[in-house]
Amino acid sequence: MAPHQNPNWEIEYRRELSRLVTFIPNKNVPIHNWFYFKEGFSRDFVLYVLNVFKVARRDVVLDPFCGVGTTLLSCKELGISSVGVDALPLMVFISSVKTRDYDLPKLKSDYEFLFRGGLEEPKSSNVKNFVKQFFKPSVLKEVLSFKEKIMNIKDENSRGLFLLALMSAAVKASYMYKDGAVLKVVKKPVPPFRKFFKRRCRIMLRDLELANLPRGIDTRVLLGDARKLDHLDDSSVDFVITSPPYLNKIEYTKAYTVEQELFLGGEKPELVRSCIGLEVRDLMSDKYSSLPPIARAYFLDMERAIGEMYRVVRKGGLLAVVVAGGVFPTEIVDSDLIISGIAEEAGFRVKSITAVNYRTAAHGKFVKLGSSRESIIFLEKPN
C-alpha cells in the first residue's frame, strides 16, 4: 500500500495563496522576469515562506529543484545565503545569471561594444532544422551574429547576462508557441530584431541599477540530481523551499529545447523532471503497485529526493514543498498525501498541508474523476 494520510495531519484550504505558487506575479518583478518560466512559483511565495519560517541572514536555504532561481534570487535580495540544484543546464545558467554580482560600469562598456558598428556574417551554420523552423531567416541570422559577438566579450559575467538577454529577445521574436511540452510554429509579424534586443539589454541593465542588490551573498547554483545531493554535507542547510516536478504534468525539458539547443548547445540532461529521472524498468518495489507506472516511478524517485533533503537539513530545519495531484484516466492520485507519507517515513514531521487550489478533473467529456489538489506541504526535521 502507498503511504496514506495520517489522522494527525492538519489540512487547511487557503485559496489566497493560489496565485503565489504560480510564476505569474514574477512577470512584473525586475530580474525575476528576465526569463518566463511557466512551471515556477513566485517571489511572493518565497518571501511569504521566509517570513513564516523566520529565516535569518545567518541561515542557508536550499532549493533542490531550483528552476530559474526564484528561491535563490529572493533570498539574495534579503541577504540570505542559498543553494540551488537543477538537472537542466539551461536552468542552472539562468539561475546563475540572475543571482551574480555585477560590475555595472563593465556591463555598460560591454553593452556599447555589442551595439557598436554593424554585424559580421555568422560563422555558425550548424543550427538544426528543428530550431530553424521557429525563426524568420533574417532574425535567426541576427541572433547568431549577436551570439558570436557576445562570445567575444572577455568578462564571463557580461557574457552570461547578454546571452540571457539575447535568449529572451530571440524567443519573443520567434514563431515559437509553447502548447504544454509541444512546440508549435505560429507565423506572426516580428519586430526589427536589433532594436528589440537592444531594448531588452537596456531594461536588464536598468533593473540591476535600480535593484541595488546586496553583494557578496553566498549563492551557489549547481547542476545535479535532487536524488543525490553530492555537493552538500549532512545537516548543512537550515531550510528548504522547493517545488518538485508535478506528477504526470508536461515534460519541461522538451518545452525549452530550442533555448537549450540554440544558446547552450544540445547538451541533454540525464534526468527527466516529469518523473525526476527513474525509468520504469528500475521499479523493483511493489509499494506503489496500485498506481499507474509513471506514478510508481515518480514516488520512488521522491523517496530518494526527500531522503536527501532529510540528510542535508539540520535538526529543527523547516521545509515548504509545493506539489500537485496527478490525473490519470481512471483516478486522481493525491500527491500531497503520498509525499507527506514519504516525508514521515524519512523522519520528518508533517506540520501541515495547505491546499491552495482544486481543479475538477474528468476523463473525456462525461466521466468526472473528482478534484485534483495543489498543496504546500510544511515539514520539520525533529530535534
Image (tube, helix red, strand yellow):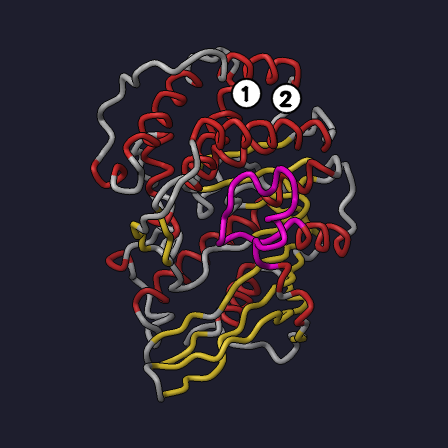
Q: Which of 380 and 221 is in front in this view?
A: 221
Bounds of the magenta segment: 21-43
Q: State which quadrant residue 6 falls in.
A: bottom right
- The quadrant in which the C terminus is found is bottom right
**Tag shown at residue 157:** 1
Residue under the point 45% across and 56% down: 245
Q: In the image shown, does 185 or 266 lie closer to the viewer?
A: 185
Left or right: residue 177 compared with residue 69: left
State the separation of the CA atoms marked 1 and 2. Answer: 7 Å
Residue 161 location, x and y as percent? 53, 26
Q: Quadrant of the N terminus?
A: bottom left
Image quadrant in which you'd find residue 293: bottom left
Residue designated by label 2 = 102
**Percent from the top left, x then y, of residue 115?**
49, 17
37 is within the stretch colored magenta: yes
Using the image, determine if residue 5 lies above or below residue 133.
below
- Amino acid type at circle 1 is Asn
Say whether residue 255 is left or right of residue 77. Answer: left
Instruction: Name the residue located 46 percent from the left edge and 39 percent from the top edge.
Output: 91
Q: Kindly indicate the quadrant of the structure image that contains residue 278.
A: bottom left
Looking at the image, do the residues carrying marks 1 and 2 touch, with CB atoms under 8 Å apart?
Answer: yes
Image height of 6 relative to 28, above or below: below
Which badge, 1 or 2, comes first in the chain's sequence? 2
Residue 129 is a magenta residue? no
